Image (cartoon, rainbow, N blue to C red):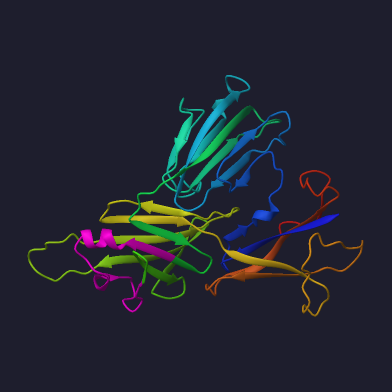
Amino acid sequence: MRQIPKYSTSNKYPEYLNIHANELNTNNTCGDILTNLNGNISLNSDISSGSDYCVWYITVPNNYKILLNFETFLPKTPQCCDSSSLSVYDGAPVGSALLGDLCRINKRDYVSTSNSLSVVYTRQAAKQTDLDFFATYYSIFTNNQNVRLSCHSDYMEVQISLWYLQSLRYSSDDLFLNDPQCRPQLVANWLQFHIPYDSCLTVKQDENGLISYTNNLVTQSAKTIVIYRKNVDLTLKCRFYENTLVEGMYTANDFIKNTIIQYGQYSADLIFFQSSNFIYPVNHQPYNVELNQNLYLQATLRTSDPTLVLFVDTCLASPDEFDFTRNIFYIIRNG
């Protein structure tokens, strides 16, 4: 019997941020977290549990976009779209642009502007799922980039092409964050800013269940009446949102003023120990235990944000290591 704990982070406020590690993905028929370059998502009314709300989060590596194609979309009845929707979002379901609702428009192909897409199925309460679909997604490499933003557990990193900066007639001495003391490093042909979430005057906000960290990257020109160079004003934002892990990069090309948003992931360690002194970790997998044996598990959140705390949300057991949807036993459920 294999036991899987799920852990969460909290902002010490009523809004909680649930984080599920990639290795904890299960064979859910309604909703999933997909991180491969290519894959598919589907909903089958014959085997679905009849959930009223399902989210498929798709995130691919840095410098890629996502092409999503719905090969089949089959409403069970002509009236099912009156109470149901299947929506595609350009990023997270909260705070991202709606690309389309398949129940309302005939569009079947979608392309993301970053490395993330979400598919959301909702319906009014009923006895069974009222539509079937099958969709395939592919990753498209994007090579033309002047500005790169990546989000990590405790910092964000932005890179600006030196060629692009020089084309605007600026140097590294003209570029500043909220805190002018936070200076960049030169890495190959890129100017790179390392921006911790707890310094460089990074601003933290709660946005409808999302935790965001924001900084600004601006150029300072001489204060003259006639300005011969365009000012650069970039808003850099990393968002961490509920019930998924996504990691990637949003790229913006040939802009002067823009807001760059990326969805990052909190990093956490989940380690079993051999005894209550928490000195000797278990380094082999699978970890075989006896029934009624005490287990010692340590979860550590690696972040520079001191307001976040870690707590156990769900721990469950199953006699089948490949199926954590049926015949499961909850040791801890929703805290």
Q: Residue 168 magenta-drawn?
A: yes
Name the residue nearer the viewer: 195 or 325.
195
Name the residue nearer the viewer: 214 or 35.
35
Q: Give left or right: position of 192 versus 125.
A: left
Residue visible at 56% across and 66% down?
A: 13
Q: Residue furthest front?
A: 188
Q: Residue furthest top?
A: 78
Where is residue 211 drawn, in percent x and y? 50, 61
Q: Residue 334 magenta-drawn?
A: no
Q: Quadrant of residue 119?
A: top right
Where is residue 54 drawn, in percent x and y? 62, 41
**Quarter of the rendering occupied by the N terminus:** bottom right
Where is residue 116 drawn, in percent x and y? 49, 47
Looking at the rendering, the stretch of residues picked out in magenta corresponds to: 157-185
Residue visible at 50% across and 38% down?
A: 88
**Quarter of the rendering occupied by the C terminus:** bottom right
One can see residue 332 in this view = no
Residue visible at 49% across and 49% down?
A: 94
Q: Give left or right: position of 230 versus 129.
A: left
Name the residue nearer the viewer: 46 or 209.
46
Where is residue 233 drawn, in percent x and y? 27, 61
Q: Residue furthest left?
A: 225
One can see residue 285 in this view = yes
Q: Quadrant of residue 81?
A: top right
- Seen in the picture, residue 174 relative to 97 is either above or below; the reply is below
How many marks the image carries: the answer is: 0
Q: Residue furthest right?
A: 291
Residue visible at 54% across and 34% down?
A: 86
Q: Quadrant of residue 286?
A: bottom right
